[in-house]
Image: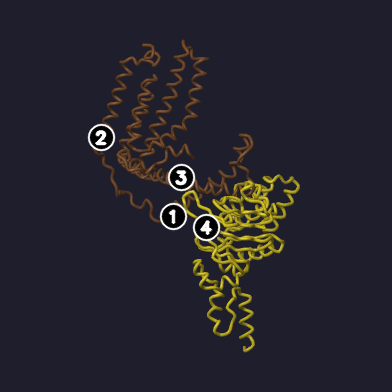
Chain colours: A brown, B yellow
Amino acid sequence: MSVFDGFKFRSVSSPVHRMDPRAKFFYVCVLFAVAVMFNQLVPLLVLFIIQIPFVLVARVQKEWLRSMKGSALFAILIFAMNLLSLYFYGGYASLASILERSLTMTARFVVLIESFSIFFLTTSPDLLGLALEQSHVPYELCFAFTTAVRFVPVLAEEAQTIMDAQKARGLELEGGNFARRIRNYIPILIPLIVNAIRRSLELAETMESRAWGANKKRTNLYVLRAGQKDLLLILLSISLLAGSIYISAFVKVPSLTEILLV
Amino acid sequence: MIKVEDVYFAYPNGVEALKGVSLEIQDSEFVAIMGQNGAGKTTLVKHISGLLRPSRGRVSVDDTETTKMSVATLARKVGFVFQNPDHQLFSETVEEEISFGLRNFGFEEKTIKERVDWALNLLDLTEYRGVSPFMLSGGERKRVALASVLAWDPKVVILDEPTIGQDSQQKERLRQFITQLNRQEKTVIIVTHDIEFVAECRPRVVLMAHGKILAEGEAAKILTDPELVSQASVVLPEIAQIFLKLADLGFPKEVIDVYEAGRLLLERFGEST
């Protein structure tokens, strides 16, 4: 559960939380693009560092650290895989360059996780749904999305009850080898999935009986308006993107080893 | 014997569900735990089956503390049938569903077959042996859940809200069934809101409110005390309400079941007609 806590919305009153989700989403997309654009370690480290002020302003350090910790296992895996494959098949000259290249791949992964974590930690599912709606995504899809997010805690509680019920029938969840442990979870997953499907069918019926979708032209109580801060973030994101394109096209980015050797 | 000694329990969200509960349940006793929503009934029985561990105090089954056993080990002795059967059904057929617990406890194949046949027969499910439990009606699913626990013949059977979703005929069968279990020397503990059901079963009643035990004793005593019952936000059984009003005519007050009420009324008025 702890890893997911790093991506779960925290209701904090901060400037980052109050920002327009569309602006934040644009920023995440730009970050994504830039992270893929560079194959050198230095720019990726810069990307990692420039996001930290956001975390601090939004006061979600604890949760952010949790997402970072949660991604550590994958990060190590990515590092090890790159290191091994580059060492045996890469044809690189020095160990230092292999190390740097593997670190780059790992850093890219961490930067992506970092930006997603910040986005989801600071954007409420309702605002996100609203943002999708105002971006002309069909209302049915937006609704499905926000409902799915809203039902996560309900499912978590239900999973606990099911676990209790099966334990009371003699199911030992702990112990045994990996395959056995996976098999132990079947009696928990099946009721959970069946109940989720049942619940969604019931929800659909009760909503249709309350005239859901009767009005084709919906209006909203809240309407998102991009303020100055949001425009600033978009502007910064655009400059980041433009700058990155310029650098990757015309400037030779030095590797960390070169910087350290100078 | 089940012993609950001064147990306190708080859920992780801070809700104090039990505040100093002490209770003793003898072997082959039949007990109904009653009270309004949130009184702590289910929390209490979850302690008996080891699913919850007390924050303070101790719970023991046959002189062994529940904290010293895993839930699965304790389950061999204490069978717990959950309120909603959909929280436990997962197998392809009713037969497999019932044998799940038996396999977990490591019974031999031959014994498993015998026990499954016995449980299917006991709950009138033999014709559904090869049917998927998901295809059954609510009441039938509940019976499958019950069969899947009774199959390993636990000494103590806990039933959480057994009457919910059952029609009156099924309820009557359930009542007979529980009485029969109890006659076979099983300890039966039911958690329920259904006061009419309790009035007809006549178990020992444990009345709970706000995480404490308000009163316990014979059903006819507890369920005819208007003040006590209203403290637990429960409504008197209909028969008890009538006989409370008939008290002025010299009828006894502690009458809760239809049969006794019928007998008393016939005795008085039957002769004159």
Label 4 in the same subunit as label 2 = no
Real-space Cα separation, disc 4 to disc 2, in angstroms: 55 Å
Mark pair 2, 1: CA separation = 41 Å
* N-term-proximal mark, 3 vs 2: 3
How crowded pointer 4 is (Cα within 10 Å; few <14, some 14-19, many 20+) is rated as some
Can residue B224 be seen in the rendering of this structure? yes
Quadrant of the image containing the N terminus of chain B = bottom right
Q: How far from the left and from the top, in percent, is residue A163?
A: 57, 46
The chain to which mark 4 is attached is B
In the rendered image, which residue does mark 2 sit on? A231
Question: Residue B19 has which mark?
Answer: 4
Badge 1 marks a residue whose secondary structure is: helix
Residue tagged 3: A152
Whether discs 4 and 1 lie on one chain: the answer is no
Q: Amino acid at mark 3?
A: Val
Q: Which chain hosts label 2?
A: A
Quadrant of residue B251 within the rendered picture: bottom right
Question: Which type of secondary structure does the marked residue at label 3 adopt?
Answer: helix
Q: Chain of mark 3?
A: A
Q: Nearer the viewer, mark 4 or mark 2?
A: 4
